[in-house]
Amino acid sequence: MHPLVRGTWAPKGQTPVYRYRLRHQRHLSTIGAITISPVQRRLGWYLAFHPDRSVRQDEVLDFLRDLLRHVRGPVVLVWDRLGAHRAHRVRAYAKKRGRLDLEYLPPYAPELNPNEYGWAHLKGPELANDCPSDLAELTRHVRRSARRARARPDLLRGFVRATKLPLRL
């Protein structure tokens, strides 16, 4: 709920003032996947939001169920080594679903994760200097920003290309 304060422009002598509440320590957790269709070379960005909850194995399983409902064919999921991603129930679910293959990035390698570039984009130009009054407003702002990003294939392609992974786009 704390605003992401970035440098900004203002008329000389009129320093911008950001007002926000400090009373509560609420947060919004997200889980996401950038998808690449191998045939059509189309990109997508699927996100799930969890207000006031951390992403744990139950949230990961829900996300995988939703993802497999929206994405056709075999899915190779490359993600970081978050404990919830490596949980026994998550691996068992992937094994049971024959079309889901889990691959993990090396430890401490956020520069190889396209989602990290997506989060940076949302936190940077999209949500910088935004002071939502409550968690519902923050969630609306993040959803709206993510929708704008999803509508820009060039931006999603940039997230993937920034990783320097050998992917054909």
Image (tube, grey):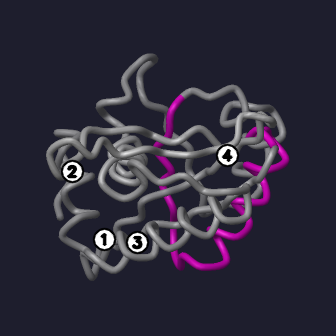
User: Residue sitting at 29 percent across and 30 percent down?
Assistant: 111
User: Residue sitting at 21 percent across and 41 percent down?
Assistant: 13
Q: Which sits earlier in the primary sequence, circle 2 or circle 1?
A: 2
User: Residue sitting at 40 percent across and 72 percent down?
Assistant: 44
Q: Is residue 37 among the parts visible in the rendering?
A: yes
Q: Amino acid at mark 2?
A: Ala
Q: Residues within 10 Å of mark 2 (few under 14, many from 20)?
A: few
Tell me the element at label 2. loop
The segment highlighted magenta reads 53-80
**Circle 4 is placed at which residue position?**
29
Residue 112 placement: quadrant: top left
Instruction: Point out the image quarter for the C terminus.
Output: bottom left
**Circle 3 is placed at which residue position?**
44
Q: Which sits earlier in the primary sequence, circle 4 or circle 1?
A: 4
Q: How far apart are the alpha carbons under marks 3 and 4?
A: 20 Å
User: Residue sitting at 78 percent across and 59 percent down?
Assistant: 62
Number of the label disc, if any, that sits on residue 10: 2
Q: Amino acid at mark 1?
A: Pro
Residue 129, percent from left and from top: 41, 48
Q: Which sits earlier in the primary sequence, circle 3 or circle 4?
A: 4
